[in-house]
Image (spheres, rainbow, N blue to C red):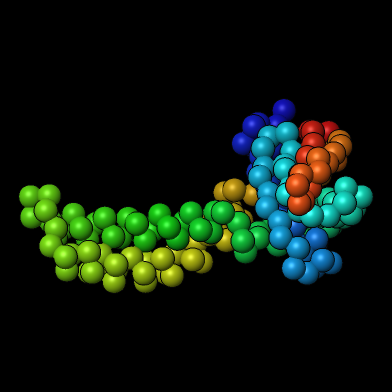
Amino acid sequence: MTSIIDSTRKNHALEHATMTILAERYRGVRMMGHSSPVGFILMADLPTEIVTEAVLEAKRRLENGEPNLAVHPNCGTNMAVSSLASSAAAFSVLGILSNKGKNAWWHYLIATLVAIPAFHLAKPLGPKLQKNLTTDPDTQDMAVQMVTSQKTANSFVHFIRTSAS
C-alpha cells in the first residue's frame, strides 16, 4: 500500500511533468498546480482534452526514463527554501546584534545585506529538495483515473484524479 506522502510525491512529479509539457506546447499560458494524495489540481486556461493528453504523456515520459520532468523551476519548494534561508540569516543577524531585544537602524541594514546573498546561495537547494524529497518520478504503480474541469470567470480548474494501481 502506498502511503499518503508517497502518493503526494508521485502526484507532485506528475503535476510538474504535465506543466512542463503544456508550457512547451503553449508558451505563455499561465499555470498553477497543487498536489495531494489523490491527484492534483491544475489551473490553466486550456481545454480539458489538452490537459488530459498532457497528463497521459507526462506519465508515459516519466515511466520511460525522463525523471527530470519531475523537477520544475517554478515550484513553490524553490521559493520556500530560499525564503527560509534568507529569513533565518536575517533573524540570526538581528539576534546577534540586538541589545536586550532592541535593534538600531543599521542592524536591519546588515540583516538585509546578509539575507540577500543567503537567498541567492540557497537557490540550488530547491531543485535538489524537489528531486530527493518533494517529488517521486516513479509513477508506474499509479493510474490516472479521471480528468475533470470547471470553467471559472477567465480560466479553467482541472482536477486530475489518480490512484495506486
Question: Can residue 144 be seen in this snapshot?
Answer: no
Residue at 57% in and 49% down: 133
In percent of width and height, residue 26 lies at 82, 66
**Number of labelled discs?**
0
In percent of width and height, residue 52 lies at 88, 48
Decide which of 78, 65 is in the foreground and name it: 78
Residue at 20% in and 58% down: 94
Q: Is residue 33 left or right of residue 53?
A: left
Quadrant in the rendering for residue 68: bottom right
Question: Can residue 99 be seen in this snapshot?
Answer: yes
Residue at 51% in and 66% down: 124
Residue at 44% in and 64% down: 122
Q: Is residue 11 above or below residue 111?
A: above
Q: Residue furthest front?
A: 153
Q: Is residue 103 left or right of residue 58?
A: left
In percent of width and height, residue 40 lies at 72, 42
In percent of width and height, residue 108 lies at 22, 64
Query: In what quadrant of the picture does the N terminus appear?
Result: top right
Query: In what quadrant of the picture does the C terminus appear?
Result: top right
Decide which of 36, 151 is in the foreground and name it: 151
Q: Residue furthest top?
A: 1
Q: Residue furthest left?
A: 100
Quadrant in the rendering for residue 84: bottom left
